[in-house]
Image (spheres, rainbow, N blue to C red):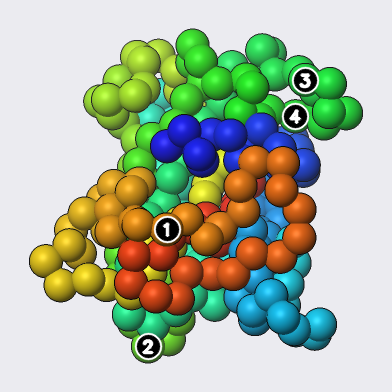
């Protein structure tokens, strides 16, 4: 999880305003936009989809009420038979967010702590379509890394959702691959903090990496 937090410190993220929905519930704008953190077409190519490009066909919703939050992401372009996890970085107190010297006037890894943190959202092995829907239901105070009272409808909440690949499913390890951050991981092939350039998506058993980013605020 430490590597995931460090990566978020270096990301330049779009921040948009919250849009009120029905009474007692807030729907957040996003994803804005969903982008590739790794290069799904391979690092040797000069055409096609590359790292930093939008995730074509992806979508998502995030709603908050006084009992918690529900974040739903439809991820596209994933690998058949590979295991993935969804990680939710939540900023329930954006008043603490600064640009941290990066010129980025939004929340990032430097702003974690207090009512801001990170938690597991969901996991799945992807089928032949290459699409997967991940749903995180975060009940206020019921998730280990959350503190009571961090969610409130109408408050300026923000969520960064990272889809992480754990490579091809490994017999006997699938549960770890779809429920933990390092399940089945021997080699990290995704982008590391302060690195630039293209990075491949995991392809072989034991390879892991963060592949997609969604932002809701």
Residue 84: x, y in percent? 37, 62
Image: 42 above or below 52: below
The residue tagged 4 is: 106
Cα distance between the residues tagged 4 and 1: 31 Å
Which is more toward the observer, 172 or 122?
Answer: 172
The residue tagged 2 is: 128
Label 3–label 1 contact, CB within 8 A: no
x 61%, y 75%: residue: 40
Cα distance between the residues tagged 4 and 3: 9 Å
Closer to the eye: label 1 or 2: 1
Closer to the eye: label 3 or 2: 3
**Neighbour class for label 2 at 10 Å: few (<14), some, many (≥20)?**
few
Label 3–label 2 contact, CB within 8 A: no
Image quarter hosting the C terminus: top right
Residue 190: x, y in percent? 56, 58
Label 4–label 3 contact, CB within 8 A: no
Q: Residue 187 carries which label?
A: 1
């Amino acid at each position: 999880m430490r590597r995931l937090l460090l990566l978020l410190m270096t990301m330049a993220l779009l921040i948009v305003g919250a849009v009120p929905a029905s009474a007692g519930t807030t729907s957040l704008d996003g994803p804005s936009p969903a982008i590739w953190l790794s290069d799904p077409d391979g690092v040797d190519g000069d055409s096609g989809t590359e790292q930093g490009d939008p995730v074509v066909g992806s979508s998502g919703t995030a709603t908050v009420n006084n009992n918690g939050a529900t974040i739903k992401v439809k991820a596209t372009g994933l690998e058949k038979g590979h295991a993935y996890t969804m990680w939710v970085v939540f900023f329930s107190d954006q008043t603490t967010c600064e640009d941290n010297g990066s010129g980025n006037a939004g929340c990032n890894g430097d702003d974690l702590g207090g009512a801001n943190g990170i938690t597991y959202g969901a996991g799945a092995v992807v089928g032949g379509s290459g699409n997967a829907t991940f749903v995180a239901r975060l009940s206020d105070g019921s998730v280990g890394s959350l503190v009571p009272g961090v969610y409130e409808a109408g408050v300026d909440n923000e969520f960064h959702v990272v889809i992480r690949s754990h490579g091809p499913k490994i017999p006997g390890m699938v549960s770890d691959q779809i429920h933990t951050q390092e399940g089945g991981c021997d080699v990290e092939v995704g982008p590391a903090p302060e690195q630039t350039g293209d990075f491949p998506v995991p392809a072989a058993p034991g390879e892991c990496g963060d592949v997609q980013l969604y932002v809701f605020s």
